[in-house]
Amino acid sequence: MNGISSLQDMFAESDPVSRNYMVEEIFGFSSQIELPGYEPGYPLVPEACADFVWSPGLAKDLIEWLAESHPDPLWISGPTGCGKTEVLKTMFAQLNIPTVVVSAKKSTEADDILGRVQLVDGNTVFVPGHLLKAYARGYAIIFDEIDSYNADVLMACHRLLERQTVVLDDGTIIVPAKRVLMAATANTRGDGDGADVYTGTSLFNLATLNRFDKIVMDYPESTVEEQILQRALPTLDHSVIGAMVKVATDIRKAWSGGSCPGPISIRDLKRWGRKLILGGNRTDVSPIYHAFDKAFGFGTDIHVRGMLYKLIESHFDVQAPELEVLSR
């Protein structure tokens, strides 16, 4: 069975309709730059995060990437929980670009994402994976946690990363769409830096890394993070949100200095806020601390929690409970 015809059969529905968007529609600030996307209503467009807030510097980096006629694949590295995947999904959602997210794990092989030869109706045919379908159709492709892949998996994707026609072992021919957006998220740069913190990550050769544009993300500035929490938790008092963000900043500094086993993520902060809203009237526990523990603190040992309680106490001016009581 011819590879091209099999792909055409699998994509019998009509192509998405192209449309340009002004930067202000997507990122919220004035610019004369137009960004290519599609008309709304097409399947596989990710759901936009309702409480997302763009950091200006990151937005400008992404605008420059999107404005290229044929952007190189993009590698976004940054600490866990800083919103890397959410950034990409929100951007593609606002541009109405169908998106395939390819999640990584150590056991992933090239055939798992590219496709396999299978027996179909008595015939041996190549069945392409979602990545190749997206590549041929012009969807966005997100390699989520790409530094969890084995290095040979990405080497097998080199021609895709170069937007070249791919000829597979069985003769199947995959022709890329005119414009393909590929982006990857990672905790590390892929060169071994940070592997001591993020165990299980892979080391990639320069031939692979050289195929990517690079952006480094960090946790949002405090003003942006406060806006995110205010949108996500509109019933929570602004002063409480401000104190939570200050605690988070201090925890991340402690993590950088080696005195905390992990940073607190935006996801953790939202969870802390939700728990506090639900349990704010409890009298059997101290609500601020108990909500924090369920969101983050119970994942650390008692000595670390004691240090974290001091950070909370300094910003909330609420006396910390005795840990011996909570740990029984």
Image (spheres, rainbow, N blue to C red):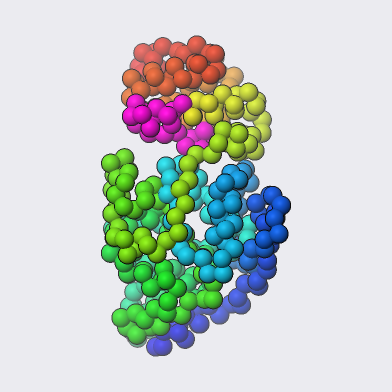
The structure residue drawn at horizontal position 60% and vertical position 37%, both measured from the top left corner, is 224
Query: Does residue 243 appear in this view?
Result: yes
Residue 218 position (above or below residue 143): above
238 in magenta = no
- In the rendered image, residue 176, in percent from the top left (x then y), is placed at 48, 76
Identified at 47% across, 72% down, the residue is 135
Which quadrant of the view contains residue 254?
Answer: top left
Q: Is residue 255 above or below residue 81?
A: above
Point out the residue furthest to the bottom here. Answer: 1
Occupied quadrant, residue 119: bottom left
Residue displayed at 59% across by 50% down: 59
Q: Which residues are magenta?
A: 250-271
Asked if residue 265 is among those painted magenta in the image, a careful observer would answer yes
Q: Quadrant of residue 14?
A: bottom right
Q: Decide: is 255 above or below 319.
A: below
Q: Position of residue 236 (x, y in %)?
A: 63, 28
Quadrant of the rendering where the N terminus is positioned:
bottom left
Q: From the viewer's perspective, is 43 left or right of 301?
A: right
